[in-house]
Amino acid sequence: MGVHERHYTPFGGPSTPAWSRFLVLTRYALQDVLRRRVVILLLVVSGISPLGMLLLIYARYNLGFLALFNLQSADQLMPAIGVGVYEGLLVTQGVLAFFLTLFIAPPMLARDLANNGLPLYLCRPLSRFEYVMGKMATLLWLLSCTTWIPGLLLWGLQAAMAGGGWGTTHLRILLGFVVGSWLWMAVLALLAFAISAWVKWRLAAMATLIGVFFIPPIFGNVIDARFVTHWGKLLNLLELMHVACGGLFGSYTAGESVVAVYDNGRAIDVVVRDLPQWCAWAALSLLCATCVFLLSRKVRAYEAVRG
């Protein structure tokens, strides 16, 4: 076999800026994700509710449309589009964002960790943080297209069509929708990536992610019923999101309720307080911090195995 001398020269083209090198991972991960039919289907379904709300906004503020029904005011046709409608839209889009995370996030880290692929990434000019962000940016981009971006566009459309300073007086709706969306996205992304980093099998990671949302609330309900308290709700992620986002929209205030407790056959009224907003924010912050810690422990170029 002939051996020919070869001369290699370094790449002479423009270098990628250091701050954006993690986006290379995002680009290839996005191409891989968009090949899955279930992801495309979920993205299409996620556009149904915003489209329906867009038609409602157009119908409410379009005088020509109201004239077709001989209406003097849109209130005769439909109720006002306010906080309750945007909260309902956020819940609907949040459910679809959960299913998107369920099908997108687990394979991203699990495959690299299961096949010892991290050294191939980290031997290049990429840090562990940039590796995780490169993968996570794919998920966050798709979740953004499902949650806060449609809400922002719908709020802007309604503010433009309503006029009369509607946008100024309803800035809290925009704040609640955008901040609430990013809070939900952060919880989903960090939780899914932390689980997939420790549970390297994709199906097991998906099952664990589902279990985190539905199993702890059972124990929380038992705690609330046994001790007549509200602290068991701290184990319910959906309840924590309800309290946090309700506070952002201004629709949730912690109150009190009276619960009848039977002691030796005698009914005793006990006052139970609702979960305060600061507790929900503290619990969600602690959850995100724990996920970051778990990721930092598992995402490494090598793994030491003790015999």
Image (spheres, helix red, strand yellow):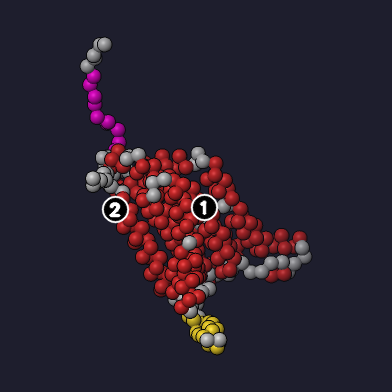
Pick the front one: 209 or 204:
204
Q: Which quarter of the figure has residue 163?
A: bottom right
**Residue where numbered disc 1 is placed:** 99
Look at label 1 and name its amino acid: Phe
Residue depicted at 44% across the width and 46% down the height: 202
Q: Which mark is residue 297?
A: 2
> For mark 2, does the 10 Å Cα neighbourhood hold few (<14), some (14 to 19), or many (20 or more) residues?
few
Q: Quadrant of the C terminus?
A: top left
**Frontmost residue, 132 versus 182:** 132
- Tag count: 2
* In-front residue for pair 284/25: 284
The reply to whether residue 222 is in sight is yes
Looking at the rendered structure, the secondary structure element under dot 2 is: helix
Residue 270 highlighted magenta (yes or no)? no
Apparent side of residue 45 relative to residue 290 in the rendered image (left or right): right
Q: Residue 199: x and y, percent?
A: 39, 49
Q: Of callouts 1 and 2, which one flags the residue occurring earlier in the amino acid sequence?
A: 1
Magenta stretch encompasses residue 10: yes
Which residue occupies the extreme top position in the image?
A: 1
Quadrant showing the N terminus: top left
Query: What residue appears at the point 51 percent right and 41 percent down from the top-left corner?
Result: 36
Residue 14, percent from left and from top: 30, 36
Q: Amino acid at mark 2?
A: Arg
Q: Secondary structure at mark 1?
A: helix
Q: Is residue 112 above or below residue 240?
A: above
Disc 1 to disc 2, C-alpha distance = 27 Å
What residue sits 31% from the left and 57% below the top?
293
| Range covered by the magenta-colored residues | 6-16
Q: Position of residue 211 (x, y in %)?
A: 47, 57
